[in-house]
Structures are given as structure tokens and as C-alpha cells.
Amino acid sequence: MKAEKPFNFDSTPGKLPKQVVPTEYSIRIIPNIDKLTFTGTETVKLNVRAPVRELVLNALEIEVGTADVDAKSLPKSSIKIDKKNELLRIALPSDLPPGEHTLTLNFSGKINQQGQGLFYARYQEQGTGANKIVLGTQFEATDARRLFPCWDEPSFRARFQLTAVVPENWLAVSNMPIESERKIDSPEANKEVRFAITPPMSSYLNVFVAGELDVIETKAAGTQIRVIATKGKAEWGRYALESTAKILEYYNDYFGETYPLPKLDQIALPGGFGGAMENWGGITYFESVLLFDPEKSSESTKQNVFEVIAHEVAHMWFGDLVTMAWWDNLWLNEGFASWMGTKCSAHFNPQWEVWLRRNFPRDPARRVGISKEQAMEGDARSTTHPVQQPIATEAEASSAFDDITYKKGQSFIRMLESFLTEKVFRDGIRKYIAAHKLSNSTTADLWNALSDASGKPIGEIAAGWTQQPGFPIVKVKRGEGGKISLSQERFTVNFKNPPPLEWKIPLTYFLAGEEPRSLLMTGKIDNLRDIPADRALKLNVNGAGYYRVDYDAASWKLLLESLARLGVDDRVDLLCEAWALVQANRASFSHYLELVEKLPASTELAEREQIINVFDFINRLLIDHPEREKFQIYARSTLRPTFDALGWEPKISESPKAANLRASLVAALGDLNDQEIIAGCRERFQKYLKEPGSLSPDLRPPVLAVVGRYADEATWNHLHELGLKTTSIEEKQNYYNALAAAIDPKLIRKTLPISLTDELPTSRAAFLVSRVARESRHPEMAWDFAKANMKALLAKSDALAANSYVPGLFTFFSDRGRIAELQSYAKAHLPPTSAKEVAKAVDEIEFRAEFRDRLCAQIAGDVLK
Ligand SMILES: [Zn+2]
């Protein structure tokens, strides 16, 4: 493995020549809302480091009208757009000598429907239901160039001063506070808003949002904090506002560096893009991941809001104040923010068990989350890649935002922290931030800071985890005289002849009831000594490590006998471990079930949810197979006692965990065809129609989903009307998710065309088809519909969807015949950049088909007692 180098501007990858560096932009944008276009001008101060005859910067789908250098206008013929490379080339009449120069450009472009560059979102206004429009931007990874020509690579830091012209009743928001406002006479709009200039930052972190917006605000540690939403909704930002204040102070302390901007805005957008984006000082969120209505929103929405804010605000330091040099280090940005956000969420909300939950998020649109298990599932396959991967093109930069980047990244960082201890790790992070603030960095810079803080060779340990794919399984074998031999090999699933790899593993372990210890396993084999033959030994303390463990029979037996003495995190880890061995065909399904049956009777949330997730996966896998009914009977009898202990009605003194678990169980038992639960859901839905307050917000999503799944036409129509009527994006999602769950083919044919209408925010509309593929038991109907309407569906999605949309739909198939169909479709219709996504989908279908056959044989046998 080639060791990575610390940050150096001149050797940072990228397309743009490094002789010319922008230092300050002054940009003025005039949107035309009626025509959905904009015009703009900008003046850029340049530092020319070596003589050049040409200026090369980025521009995409922009017309450049005029160009001046040092106030001298250039002929039109000297301006060339290189569309393929997304470059603007400006030929100069003579050498531009080193020193300060200025470039002034006039340009125009369009306001997009999808969340890229400057975009618009149409929505119904809260309270009035009036049709409105809001503008927003989404630039990461490489779309700032769609709004203004710029040096659009992260290492070209510069100061940005934005001015925008908007209608008088609109609020305009950007990274910095408004410096001045004035009335002007312009055909488009009549208010000119000038924002203060930013500190030096990367172009992709700019933001501009404008519309009829409401604001609530507070102050924390000297920083103005605001939540901004479309009119009538800002009060639902109260929880986000309070959470942001806490989170900001926590990070001020953790990073040892006070938040550097005068204000921090949290902006809820009712469409345009999904997820959230860490624009410095002006973070944008899809509305339902920021707003929380105490009357109507569920506990899991609340937790999601906190976790997403904690992730995004972590980026204000890790990503914005210090920015990765190039997109090959994106994992560091995202892995770190995911880890930091989770750590912060766990700190303020220990009762949520954030490290243990959400192993299999139900919402495919969710970008951040706790998901070591999800990362490991993907990372065990032949289609995985190292977290750190070479990035040459814009398309590669965009497709780097995957599970491996976010979730393996965060899991590795967590393992490292657990090995180094919290304090040593934090000291290293403080050194790193202090050394690189207002600049860029590479992974090597972080490892150096952590090595300084810990005295350990972090770069050497990290290389195996960040520069090679996959992860190890450690085999535990008890020998004579208290000796335990350990050996490592690569852990894979559905992967013939994997290249053998080795890792330096920061192992942690404990004897039941004793303090944890650690060992850096540096070779293929190692030993533990003096382990009493009658004591249970658990490796991977709290499941904080990113590796699997395979215990020999004697060690496994001792663990099963000691379950009641292990913490819930270690029991969840054993469940995940056992299930992974079953998936990898290293153990029979009975190995997992034996553990489930020996667990102490309890209503532990994370533990039960792990089981629910596994049962849910199998229940879907066995659709149309005779073993399904036998499995459902078994699964219901395993889960039902926990539900009966909790009951339908929330108790006044119960913890949020109980509310979450009840909701998960209702959804799971409903899917498993539990007739009493289905009847209970229908009854509660009827009551809810008359008296909405009768159904607690936590139970709404699962009750609606179960009612939707088994709906008849009248019920479907009813759910649809409710969805059309509400102006809350979260409620809308609940209703449309319920529609998408319907299993009656007649209703599926009614649900699918909704994706082509304007009923749902653009970014969510195309997802409705994926949702039907997953939930309806008829992925073939979703695929046939998508095939027939592909152009319209892709027009509603961002650029990335061209690669992943079709392969994504195929991952719901488990029938080998679909592989050839996907491959031939891809050959005829998909861009070459989709090859990786196609390979992943093929692998998933192969895996599902093989695993389903194996499980069916075991279930038909005697594995379910
Ligand atoms: Zn992020």
C-alpha cells in the first residue's frame, strides 16, 4: 500500500491548472422566477503564480456573455466552453504576468427542477394551501459551476461575497449575514440583498436560498442560530433550534475551536433535494429531516432530526473549516461527521441507543445513519471498494457518496477511538483542527495528528482499513493451559476466490464481568494467554470494532450461558455476528436462532430490533415460497410476547425506547400477517379518521403502513385523499408510504403513476417506484412501470440517479433470470458510469437467490423448532 502524503496544494489531484488561484469572488445573481432562468455577473480577484496565456475554470450549463481581465474586455472568440470537461477556457492576448489580477464575467443559466446548482421547489403553503415556489442551491460535489463560473475544486479556497435580487416579500439567505439591502428597479424583482464576505472556503460550500420564509432564532456561545422554513412552519423548528444550540456548544468544546462564523442557519426546504447539506453557516435540509411537530411527529422523527443536525453541524468544523483536499478523501469528511454526529447524539440522548440501532434503515432516501452492519454487508461482497478511492471525474466524485464512504468510514473511526480511548483521540482531533483550520488536508494529516497524540503508528494501522477493501474475521480457538489462539482471514459473502488480505486489527476483549483489554493483532495469528477454561470470553467490546468473530464450539457455549451477564450492546453484537455467519454460509440458520432463543426475556429495543430486521429480510426473501407460512408462524411466536408485554397503548411513564419498539413490532407483526395486529391497526385507523388525536404520533407510520398494505380500494382512496390534503411533508410521506405498501395488484397500478405527478416533492416522486418495488411484493410491476416511464422518472431525479435508479430497482429481485435482463438493459440504455451499480445489483440478486434456496431447505427441514 502506498502511503498517502500530507496536504500540498500543488500535488493535489484535479483538472484545473494551479498557476492561477482565485482569492475573492464578488457575485451578483438575478433569478427570473417566471422563466426559471437567471443572469449573473462576477468579479474574481486572481493570484497569478506563474505566467499564463489562458484562464481555465469550471462552468456547466452556463452561457458566458462577456469576459474582462483587469478591466479590459476580451473578444467573444476568446471565450470557449468545453462542455465535456465542464470547463470554461478564456484565451488571453498576451502572457498574464504573476501578481494580482481581476476577471469579470457576465453569464446566464437556468433554474433546475432537480436539486443541482440553483433549483426551485414548488409546494403548498401551510395554512392557506396556496401554490408557492422557493429557490435553493445544492452544489456538492461539483455543481457550484452551474450557478457561477468558478474554480470548483475543494482545494481552491477563496472568499465569496454574494449579492442577489429577489422579490420584496422574500427572505434571502446565504452563508453569511445580510450586510445591506436596498430597493432597486429591475424587471425581475425589486430587492437587492448583499451578504457579508465569507472566510476562505471551498466553492461547493456556498449556499443561496430565497422565498416566502419564516424564522425563529436563539443564541448560543455568541452565535446567532436560526431555523428557517416556508411560511407557517418555522415553529416546528423549535426542537431543531434547541438541539442546534446544545450541539454547537458541545462541538465548540470537542474541537477546541469556537464556531468561526457569526451565524448558523438551519434551513428546511419542502423539496428539490433529499437529505441535508452542510453549506457553511447555512445548512439546508429536506423539510422532514429538520421540522418536528410535537402534535403529529413521531419519536423516530425526533431522533432522526437530532442525528442529522448533529452530523451536519459536525461538518462546520470537519469539512468546512478544514476541508478534504480532493474527493478521494470524501470518506474522511463523511465518515468523521457520521461518527461525530452519532457520538454527540448518544451523549445527549443515551436512552436512544444510537450506536446499536438502525442497522437496516427502512427509508432508502436516508443518507446518514448508524449502520455498521449495513456497511459490513456491502463490504463483504466482491463489488466493494476501499473507503479511499481514486477520483478522476465529476461523475466519480458524485458516486463516491455511498455506504462504504459514510458507514465504513464512521465504523473505522469508532474502532480507532475505542482502541485509543476517548481522551487521546479527542486530543488528536484538536491538534488536527488547530493545524489545518481555514485550509485543506488529507487523511495522512489526521493520522499524523493522532499518532502525535497517542504515540501509536496510526497511519500503519489505518492503511489496511482505508486503502484496501473488505475486513477480517477473527477465529477464536481454545487450547490447553488457558491459551486462546486467534487467526484472521478475510470475511466474504457470495465472493468466489477473494484476494487474501490481512489487517492490523485493534482488538478489544473481556472476560464476562471483567474490565475490557486490548491487543493490536499485527499478523495472521496471535494468542491470548491465561484465559480460564470455564470463563466466557467476548471479543469486540460493545461491538465497536469493524471485524467479525467466529468462536469455536466451547467458547460459543460459554457465551450462550453468560448472556444475562453481558450488556445489551454486546448481545446485539453477538446477534449481528451470528446472522453474518449465516449469510456467509459459515453457519446454519439454527446457529442464529439458538442465540435468539437463549436471550433473556426482555424488551430491550436494540436487541429486539436486530431480530425484527432479520425476520423482515427473510419474510421478504420468501415471498411466493411455501416455506414462508411456516416461517411467519415461527417469527410471530418469537416477537408477539414482547408486543403483548408492551401493549397497544403508550404508558405515561414509559421511555421513548418502548414507544419505538412498539412501533417497530406493529409494523413487523403486520407484515408477518398477524391477524390480530392487522385488525388492531384497522380499528385504530377508523378511529383516527374521526378523531386524529386518538392515535399517538409514534404509532401513525406503522398503523398507516399496515392498513395500506392490506387495503381495499376504498381504504386506498381514503389514504390518498389524506395525503393530498396535508401540507406537512412528514405526514405526506406517511400516507404515500402506506399507498406504496399495498399488495393488491389493482392498487399497485394506481400507486405507480403518482410518481409522474406533482403530488410529491420532485426528489421523492421517483423513489415512490422503488418503495413499491420493495413493499408491494411485486417488484416486477414496479420495474415494468419504470421501464415504460424512464425518461419522466429520471427527469425528476438528480444526475446520480442515471447510474443507480435502474440497478436499485433490480436489487428487490431474487430470481436469477433477472440478471441477464438487467445486463442487457444496461448495455442498451445506461451510461458506462453505471457499471459499478449494475455489478452491485447483479451480486445482490445472486446472493438473494442462493441464500433463499439455502434458507428454504433449512426451514423445510427442522431448523424452526
Ligand atoms: Zn455529511
Image (tube, rainbow, N blue to C red):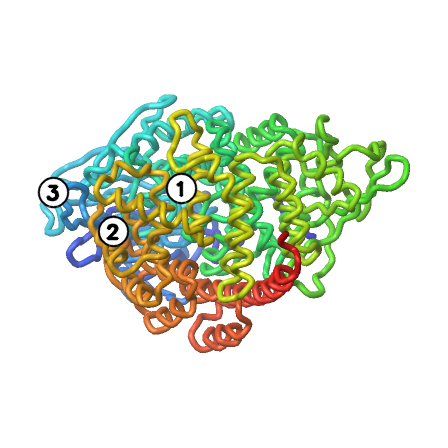
Q: Is residue 749 above or below residue 726?
A: below
Q: Is residue 356 above or below residue 843?
A: above
Q: Marks 1 and 3, Cα distance to the nearest angstrom?
A: 32 Å
- Note whether ligand 1 is within 8 Å of mark 2: no
Per the rendering, the mark at residue 219 is none
Along the line of sight, the residue nearer the viewer: 679 or 808: 679
- Note whether ligand 1 is within 8 Å of mark 1: yes
Q: Nearer the viewer, mark 1 or mark 3?
A: 1
State the residue position of label 3. 184
Along the line of sight, the residue nearer the viewer: 603 or 68: 603
State the residue position of label 1. 278
At x 21% / y 42%, what residue is drawn? 690
**Quarter assignment of residue 75:** bottom left
Mark 1 packing: few (<14 Cα in 10 Å), some, or many (20+)?
many
Q: Circle 2 — which element? A: helix
Residue 231 lies, in percent from the top left, at 19, 39
State the residue position of label 2. 723
Work out whether mark 1 precedes mark 2 in sequence or the reverse, and give the earlier one.
Answer: 1
Q: Is residue 723 above or below residue 777?
A: above
At x 71% / y 61%, what residue is drawn? 499
**Quarter assignment of residue 540:** top right
Q: Name the residue at the right extreme.
A: 481
Q: Circle 1 — which element? A: loop
At x 51% / y 49%, what residue is drawn? 636
Q: Amino acid at mark 3?
A: Ile
Q: Is residue 138 left or right of residue 474?
A: left
